[in-house]
Image (cartoon, rainbow, N blue to C red):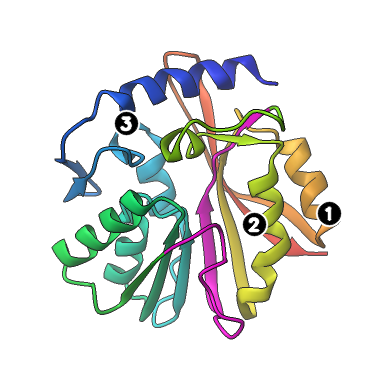
Amino acid sequence: MNTRARQAAGNLLARHREITLRQNFRLLGLDWDLLPGVYAPHLSQSSALYAEWIPYPVHGSFCEIGSGTGYVAVTAALRGCDAVTAIDMSRAAADNTRLNAERHGVADRVRVACGDMFSPLGADDRFDLIYWNSNFVEAPSDEAAADDLERAFFDPGYTAHDAFLRDAGNHLTPGGRLMLGFTDLGNAALVGEIAARHGWRPAVLRAAGCAAPEGKIDYQLVEFLRD
């Protein structure tokens, strides 16, 4: 296990635990609602990077797994996607996504669902781009998350990454793209092994290094290509 990753995630998780009341934050030049128990994107430098890097399919369809506050899903609608689906297994996160879709006037284009990975989708649901800012900190396979907030940081045995890469292809349009927000704190080698098992090949689309208390962190937008 990457001890540096676990330390960084533990520190950030502790800051999240201090958020006990609904509040607002500013990101991407806009104001957003944040509910307690939901991942707070303004506490991480990666959030704005990923949101700016994603090549939103204008007039197309976009699906975000793990929507959290919904800032990426809402940004996709604001930047021209005709249909956006935002999925999170946390009820608080799904509610938070709806709040921000309403705040920014795109609730008619942002469908919100609560469930694990692609489970809320129908067999015919297809998207031009699927994106997930993953819980990239690896944990032992027998280590259960205490709650939904902890689950947003840690992926025991990388089972969530496996489910993402196993099922995403069933929900892409012909030529649709699959992307992951990742960092060098994650286990890239294991992601590569999982991707190969499901017929994908990871390629870093964008990357940037940012200073952090635990040392420089390299943030990456990874695209998965069919072998």
Q: In this picture, which residue range is highlighted in magenta?
A: 114-139
Mark 3 → mark 2, Cα distance in angstroms: 25 Å
What number is the disc on residue 196?
A: 1
Q: Tell me if label 1 and label 3 are in contact, CB under 8 Å.
A: no
Which badge, 3 or 2, comes first in the chain's sequence? 3
In magenta segment, residue 72: no
Question: Is 69 or 104 nearer to us in this picture?
Answer: 69
For label 3, the residue is 43
Which badge, 1 or 3, comes first in the chain's sequence? 3
Quadrant housing residue 136? top right
Check disc 1 and give the amino acid type.
Answer: Ala
Residue 169 seen in the current view = yes
Residue 212 x %, y %: 43, 19
Check disc 3 and give the amino acid type.
Answer: Leu
Residue 211 x %, y %: 43, 21
- The residue lying at 66 percent from left, 48 percent from top is 161
Q: Tell me if label 3 and label 2 are in contact, CB under 8 Å.
A: no
Q: Relative to 218, is 158 on the left or the right?
A: right
For label 2, the residue is 164
